[in-house]
Amino acid sequence: MRTVHLLPLLILGAAALRLQSRSHHSLEGEFSEKIPIWVYWDEHEFKQDSFFGNLTFEALEQRIDPAKFELKLVNAANIKEHLPDAPEEFFRLYDAAKSDFLRANLIATHGGIYMDGDIMMQENFQTLWNELDHQKSEAMVYLSPGQACNKQFTTNFMMGRKGNRMCMKWADEIKKGLKSTCPYTSDRDDVNGVCCYNPDGSPRKECHIPWGRISRPQTEGVTFAKSFSLKTKLASHACIGADRGFGIDDDTGEMLWQEFDSSKEAAMEKEKGCWMEGPDMRCKNGKFMKNFMKRTGYHLYSSLNYQQRQMSRDEHLFGPKKTVARALFRRLLLGEDATDGVKNGRCGATQEDVDASDYKHLTFIHIPRTGGTAVEACTEGDSKEQWGVQNPALQGLRKLSKTVKLPEMGGACYKQHVPPSLWEASESPYADKETFCIVRNPYSRIISQFKFELAFFKKPTECSAEQLNWLIQTRLNDIQQNGNKFAADCHWTPQSFYVYGVNNETLSLDVKQRSCKNVLTYENLHAPLNALLKEHNYPYRLDKHGHSGTSVSEDCKVSQADISEESRRLIERVYRSDFHLFGYKIQEV
């Protein structure tokens, strides 16, 4: 569970039981149609590769269940469709103030989720929406560093019920302010407050809104209920904690454009460098951000990072400068391990080597937590070969319901992690290809996955044998009891599902089908892999440090010895085929 702060509850008045009853029903019942996700888009039209290469919208669309949510882009051009009573003063606001007006009024009038267009989502919307019910709250906002839920909070991402007290109060404050007359002429705007009219009553060309003045209600949260005769068991609002919120800790987003490396030593050699320490990020300039890869989402501060917002999708994801933002974007959109210790992108090959080589093509099957990111990176920038996530056809999420026939098997995995037999034959990137893959001892693969989730997931929260065994038992009991073999981006899927076939109606293994022709082992990778590459005329060579799999949470020292007997038995039952088919021994107790 993320850190959430709840305001004290006020029980006021004797009427209006409607809100009280809401706390006992699902929020989805409040919407006769889909739940709206309101996004402020300040451009006149949606253009290809504009505004951070449209990466924020790509991430957003990956995390929307279209059966339950509907994306609605809003701006001055279509505001009257959604808010027919929007005052004419709205059209005299600068962009940031328009965003403030929209979020308050849209949520008050319609309910749903609001976010600015320069927010990059990590968490899915269904999980977030469920928090309103879980926290028994009318609305939810988030905290930036130094803020407190009952005084200050940030609203460029927020959720709320239609007619919630906070947004109703806030929207009313804004509308009254926009009708106000400035006490002084524009030459004294340093002392003017919110106002849209000159002292003589004539309209100003642009309303005067001190920066941030209307970005949240001016009255402290615990007083919101005072102007309403409501009896409710719901808090007026809850706050996602600063350690899970959307704000970048330098309040400018500058940290995102620093050079990024997986190790402190390498980052310190750069003029401006950042590195990961477990789930946290540190930078050479002294900046620090807790839980960097575990945030609900990320505010990119488009107004302050204008040059970066003009970059195309390919420049952000595949450009030569390896920044924090690049690692983050690749993690959120491509499922790439952002801290994988890859030493160089071509595995020792120069451009001249690549140009001179006549490949006998191989296709790589990426089994998660077996060092696959390092192998994929060998083909980065190679126009003749694209393995895994380097292949545009394997970028983004794939819904498993496309091929898995069991209705309870919902969810999605990044395409490079989807087992080959779970693709339709007509669209499979592996059909009729000579393939290779890497398998790993199931025990050590799970240790690697624990460290990965420690860095990127809300839970686990600490490196300990107790949390290691909690994670193993939680994930593997879900597989045993519910059949959910594709959780966490297919990272817990049996490796045998990638090497052999899978019946998409029963999810049983079919060893008569073979998906991976050349099976290599993580424990003895370098010589066999380099020999295979040489045989197929590739110039790449993986050194002994290039398949570290992860440098995530290197300080975390849990090991196979910390796996309890109960967890070990679960591992052996769920991954029986991996032990048997790939020659790994079951550990003696």
Image (cartoon, grey):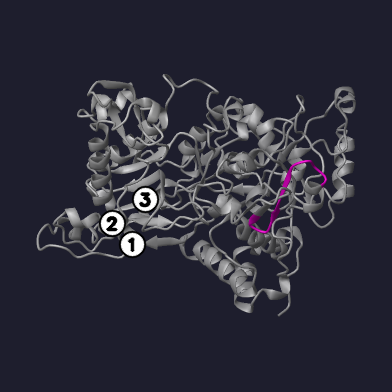
Q: Does residue 586 lie above or below 284 as drawn?
A: below
- The answer to which of 493 and 42 lies nearer the viewer is 42
Q: CA distance from mark 3 to mark 1?
A: 18 Å
Q: Nearer the viewer, mark 3 or mark 1?
A: 1
Q: Position of residue 483 (x, y in %)?
A: 49, 59
Q: Position of residue 298 (x, y in %)?
A: 53, 44
Q: Does residue 541 lie above or below 457 as drawn?
A: above
Amino acid at pointer 2: Ser
The answer to whether 143 appears left or right of 415 in the picture is left
Query: Which residue is denoted by mark 3 in the rendering?
Result: 129
Please tell me whether residue 271 belongs to the stretch shown in magenta.
Answer: yes
Residues in magenta, as a range: 269-280
**Kind of element beneath mark 3:** helix
Amino acid at pointer 3: Trp
Q: Position of residue 293 (x, y in %)?
A: 60, 51
- The answer to which of 17 and 217 lies nearer the viewer is 217
The numbered mark at residue 236 is 2
Outermost bottom residue: 589
The answer to whether 562 appears left or right of 148 in the picture is right
**Kind of element beneath mark 1:** loop
Please tell me whether residue 49 belongs to the stretch shown in magenta.
Answer: no
Pointer 2 with pointer 3, Cβ within 8 A: no
Q: CA distance from mark 2 to mark 1?
A: 7 Å
Query: Which residue is denoted by mark 1 in the rendering?
Result: 7
Any part of residue 342 in sight: yes
Q: Which of the image's four quarters has the C terminus?
A: bottom right
